[in-house]
Amino acid sequence: MGLYAGIDLHANNSYVAIIDETDELVVAKRYRNDLGSICQALEPYRDEVQGIAVESTFNWYWLVDGLADEGYPVHLVNTLAAQQYQGLKYTDDKSDARWLAHMLRLGILPTGWIYPKRQRAVRDLLRKRSQLVRQRTASRLALRNVLERTTARRLTANALKRVTTNELSEWIEDPNVRLSMAASLAMIDAASEQIEQLERAILEQAPANESYRLLTTIPGVGPVIASTIHYETGDIGRFPSVGNYVSYCRLVRAERNSNQRPKGQGLRKNGNRYLSWAYHEAAHFAVRFQPKARRWHEKKRSRTCPLVAIRALAHKLARAAYFMMRDQVPYEPARLFG
């Protein structure tokens, strides 16, 4: 007799439900988030368990990796797609876990891709770099705001990067304002140091992959953008078509139409925001460094707004990158822009 397990994962505990072929509950119990406790609960049914559905939450790494290492067939659930009937009056963790196991038994469980553990660590390092860059930018903007409202002095972006504590002391008399600006400078310097360390570690590993090398043949795509595209994409084979890929990159419209009329919008943020950022950055650089891309962008811009034009160019670059990674071919601007 086959058994099917569903785990409703939370921050500090997990609810485990196991059902049989007739949907009868075999196990329904809450456990603290401890791999040993959960494996101990599953051990009596190891030979009969056909699969374990784990809810994809912010903290799924330890559980999915641990169960896979123990030899269990694990499925990472796409939580947005695995919604129960909205008309239910009452649901709880038990019903949620049982629902996951039920969909797994029926073969209709919507699943996500389990990113390989070793490469996942490098991808997360890139995401940490992105977070630090945003924090550094926020500190620079705070520094600029204090300067403008205190001295009416407006520095360019490059001048702001070179400003020193001594210069600030000459421009600002109030010691409290100087202390605030010195704190912003210290944050910027610390973030810059950490960003450089992360980039060195990432770029030591990225060139070993052929897809990374191919992506760097796109004009304006440097090591950081190429690494982001490579690691955030993962196995290109998991995307059946180029349309699936650009949708994952958040580069298609989120619309719902019926009878040729709009009926609302889909979830615009469903996808990978890091890939969306990478292709938008690549589009900006392509306009600067590639004449054919610039001409295409200017033509598009003459018929619409600048934001839509850049987004359309990012869409084209994402389609090109998909075929480059899938077919292992270099970038060909003539095929993209004619």
Image (tube, helix red, strand yellow):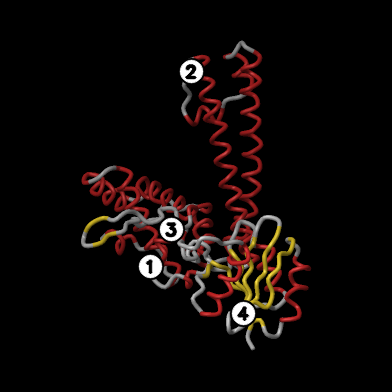
Per the image, label 3 sits on a secondary structure element best described as loop
Circle on res. 186: none
Q: Earlier in the sequence, mark 3 or mark 4?
A: 4
Task: Identify whether 10 is placed above or below 142.
Answer: below
Q: Which quadrant of the figure contains the N terminus?
A: bottom right
Indicate the position of residue 248 as horizontal and vertical percent values: 44, 61
Circle on res. 153: 2
Q: Disc 3 vs disc 4: which is toward the camera?
A: 4
Cα distance, mark 3 to mark 4? 40 Å
**Amino acid at dot 2:** Arg
Indicate the position of residue 273 as horizontal and vertical percent values: 48, 53
**Amino acid at dot 4:** Glu
Cα distance, mark 4 to mark 2? 72 Å
Circle on res. 24: 4
Asked if labels 2 and 1 touch by Cβ distance under 8 angstroms, the answer is no
Per the image, label 2 sits on a secondary structure element best described as loop
Residue visible at 45% across and 62% down?
87
Q: Disc 4 vs disc 2: which is toward the camera?
A: 4
- Give the labeled residue for mark 3: 249
Task: Identify whether 153 is placed above or below 326.
Answer: above
Asked if labels 2 and 4 touch by Cβ distance under 8 angstroms, the answer is no
Indicate the position of residue 84 as horizontal and vertical percent values: 50, 65
Q: Tell me which corner region of the image, top left, top right, bottom left or bottom right, holds residue 318.
A: bottom left
Task: Identify whether 180 is placed above or below 46.
Answer: above
**Amino acid at dot 3:** Cys
Asked if labels 4 and 3 touch by Cβ distance under 8 angstroms, the answer is no
